[in-house]
Image (cartoon, rainbow, N blue to C red):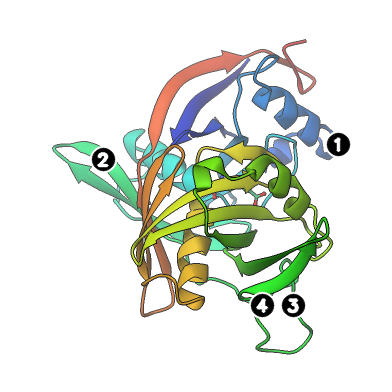
Amino acid sequence: MLNFTKWHGLGNDFVLMELSPDAIPQEKIAGFVHRVCHRHFGVGGDGLVFVYCDDKGFINMRIFNADGTEPEMCGNAIRCVAKYLYTKGLVKDTSFPIQTKAGIKVPEVIIKDGEVTAVKVDMGEPILESEQIPFKGERGSKVIDQEIQVDGKKILITAVSMGNPHCILFIDERVDQFPVHILGPQLECHRLFPAKTNVEFVEVLDRNRVSVRVWERGVGETLACGTGACAVAVGGSLCGHLDPSVEVNLSGGRLYVEWGSNNHVYMTGPAVEVFQGRCRVERWEVGS
Ligand SMILES: N[C@@H](CCC[C@H](N)C(=O)O)C(=O)O
């Protein structure tokens, strides 16, 4: 039996296990994650998050998407991990570093009347030139409002990496009526993004407020994406649509993002524990 807790950040939901994925045979991880995250045959979740201390005593977080692929980072999950560690008494300070595949991130739990009401995360610096996002071949040639063809139609995209890749579209229509389920998968697998991409559809409400729907790599449409919200704030600022401080309204709720003058991106939002449980696992086969 494996203990787990179920968490969400604005409806972007995760199964959290205090375990290193290295404890699982490499060839079994994708199937294990897929099964745990399955909404009918497993616990159900957009992803599975592993939290553990490495041999140097560093806290590590590794996240896997529901399809079993491993992204570099997850903004909503790191808030859940920070609250988990703090409320369980596994860390004493309100702010502490967490090692991820996208480098060290520093969450700070915000406490009011003895309760963790939100988590603010220093998400580090955005990356505008990387192998994950389209790059025109010259240094300094960032992808900002660049025209591309999708299914014979011309669209403008902006590409930002927060450790994981994001393709951002600023749209003129209402985002709640936008065909996210058609354009999302087409852009996720577009040849310009060699490692596939997350896709954010953004309706700008004013210079400090946006409405966003997200199509996530390896998952599909989710209710929120923390790294996506950060990428939108950076992309919107680079395109001249937004100020550096933005309220990001996602399908599952609101995040506050600030692109600081030190080039770090700060994301603030909630983290909620939903339930605890144990799942039956035999040879890393779940529920069989
Ligand atoms: N929901 C996440 C991002 C999870 C990873 C993403 N699907 C990817 O493949 O990069 C967030 O809150 O940032």
* Gap between marks 4 and 3 measured at Cα: 6 Å
Label 3 element class? loop
Q: In the rendered image, which residue does mark 3 sit on?
A: 135
Q: Secondary structure at mark 1?
A: helix
Residue type at mark 4: give it: Glu
Seen at 44% across and 37% down, the residue is 252
Mark in front: 1 vs 3: 3
Secondary structure of the residue carrying tag 4 is: loop
Amino acid type at image mark 3: Phe
Above or below for 264 versus 4: below
Residue bearing the label numbered 2: 117
Q: Which badge, 4 or 2, is on the more N-terminal residue?
A: 2
Spatial CA span between label 1 and label 2: 39 Å
Locate residue 145, reporting x and y percent.
Answer: 61, 74
Residue 71 visible to the viewer: yes
Q: Position of residue 96 (x, y in %)?
A: 38, 55
The reply to whether the C-beta atoms of the residues labelled 4 and 3 are less than 8 Å apart is yes
How much space separates mark 1 and mark 3, taking CA atoms?
Answer: 32 Å
How far is mark 4 from mark 2, CA to CA?
35 Å
Q: Callout 1: 10 Å neighbours few (<14), some, many (20+)?
A: few
The quadrant where residue 158 appears: bottom right
The answer to whether residue 98 of the structure is visible from this angle is: no
